[in-house]
Amino acid sequence: MKTTKKWNKLFLMGMFGLSLLMAVFTGCASTGAGTADSPGILVITGIPKEYEGKFVSLSKPGLKNDLKSFIASAEKPKDAVGTSTVIKNGEVKLSLYTYKESPIPFVGPTVNGYTGNETGAVGLLINDTAERSYGQPDVIFESVTFENGTANLKWNDAFKTGLITITNIPAEFDDRQASVHIGYRGGNILSVNADISFIMIDIQDGTLVTPKFVRENGVLKSYSGTDKKDIFVSIVMGPRNASLRILPPHKDFLFKAVQITNGKAILDFAKGIEQK
């Protein structure tokens, strides 16, 4: 009799454990332990025609007051991906959710619609496809106020970022650092007159890519226009002697009248003119 009770107890414990395990894996297979109710909505209007049909998603702007910690675009719940992130007729609507990680192993986060009233920075990535992407945003709204999870923005109020890429850099410059000055109007490595400057950029695998923006004295800076600009590049060839304040050896190159479109350009290093 005691043996029968013991086996019944073990059987019930085993069934409970199996049920718990099934619940865990069921939760893992879904979008999370909870369900996403009505999402918050971020609306951007007045988007230029050149971006029509492209996809928009949220990106962490890299600013202290960004909203990425508690809202995310509709990309994260896979069943919400689709036309809601596509620019149509100069407008895009992003669904916003909050995510709370589960303390139970293998169980996904609880997903709820964002209903907050915070104010902060919002960064947007613009892509040709719906595939998830990362990196610095293409557009930044520095101060966005949400009311019950909803905000409406105008494209022209955004800070637009640029991106300059230099390719085919010889191996002798690999793993060195360089500064890039867009809209160069004269000067040397000690004092450069330019529209926007990026410093301490790593050259890797024959390629240099500037950040999309810098922050100087609390102000965001970038070049995002469409124009022809001279670009000055200075590559550091050795360490700086800090105690004597002596500049390290460097090599300078000038790219004349570079066509920049929406702040973006790809340069071939061979077209740079070495400065003596």
Image: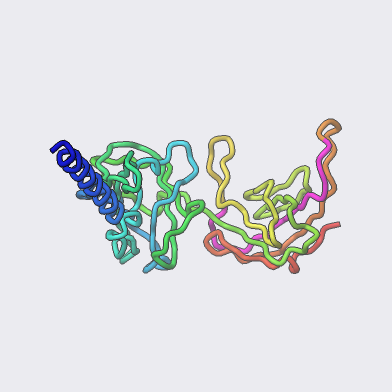
Residue 94 is at least partly visible in this image:
no
Horizontally, is 168 left or right of 57 in the view?
right
Residue 151, image x and y in percent? 29, 46
Quadrant hosting residue 13: top left
**In front: 221, or 19?**
19
Residue at (24% x, 41% y) in the render: 115
Q: Is residue 230 magenta?
A: yes
**In front: 39, or 259?**
39
Q: Is residue 35 magenta?
A: no
Residue at (81% x, 34% y) in the render: 242
Residue 116, image x and y in percent? 27, 39
Residue 121, image x and y in percent? 41, 42
Residue 181 to residue 8: above or below: below
Span highlighted in magenta in the image: 223-241
Residue at (20% x, 47% y) in the render: 15
Quadrant hosting residue 77: bottom left
Residue at (65% x, 54% y) in the render: 182
Residue 29 is at least partly visible in this image:
yes
Horizontally, is 73 left or right of 185 in the view?
left
